[in-house]
Amino acid sequence: MKKSIIAGTMAVILAVGGAFAAQERVAPGVCGAGQPCEKRDGQAFVEHRMDRMAIVLGLSDAQQTQIKTILQAEREKNAPLRRQMADVRKELHGAMKAPTVDEAKIKGLAARQGQLKGELLVAHAHTRTQISGILTPEQREKAEKLRATMKHGPRGPHHRFGG
């Protein structure tokens, strides 16, 4: 179940632009157009992905504006869930490193983590549906093909999950 949640999350991320890495092969440490990667804040990263998605799918200015609005609203709405997820993850890691095993605590935290992941996946599914509604049928088809090529990540099915 954990792998399917992670895989689902990755699919949503790819739907928003991650699949476009297949379109541009660059050397490690190079972000594109031969320019070195710089540490990006979240907003700059989203803008970079949006620019790539606009080029690959041929998005109009109006589509880009609509998608940016959707992504901003999703980011703001789900920020508390992401903060809770980070807090639970940190607490779970602490519980896992404790000198004694507290099964009830670990199971409770894992259950909470699963609940938060589920809420985030539903939110991402809504976002993906909204973005899909903005695309033309041709753009949707192209996005689906790109998603299919990136189903297991750029390095194959076992790279991301170690299995």
Image (cartoon, rainbow, N blue to C red):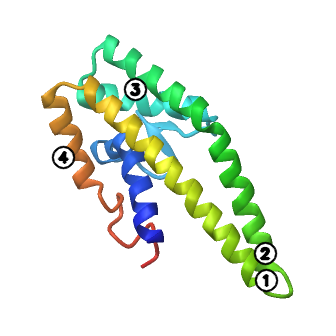
Q: Which residue is mark 1?
A: 102
Residue drawn at the location 41% of the way across and 35% of the way down: 127
Q: According to the image, label 4 marks what residue? A: 145
Q: In screen coordinates, is 24 left or right of 85? A: left
SS category of the residue bearing label 1: loop
User: Mark on residue 92?
Assistant: none
Query: Quadrant where the N terminus lies?
Result: bottom left
Number of numbered labels in the structure image: 4
Which label sits in the foreground, 2 or 4?
2
Q: Name the spot of residue 163 as percent of width and height, x first.
A: 42, 79
Residue linked to disc 2: 95
Mark toward the start of the polypeptide (4 vs 3):
3
Q: CA distance from mark 2 to mark 1?
A: 7 Å
| 146 vs 23, nearest the viewer | 146
Q: Amino acid at mark 4?
A: Lys
Q: Amino acid at mark 1?
A: Asp
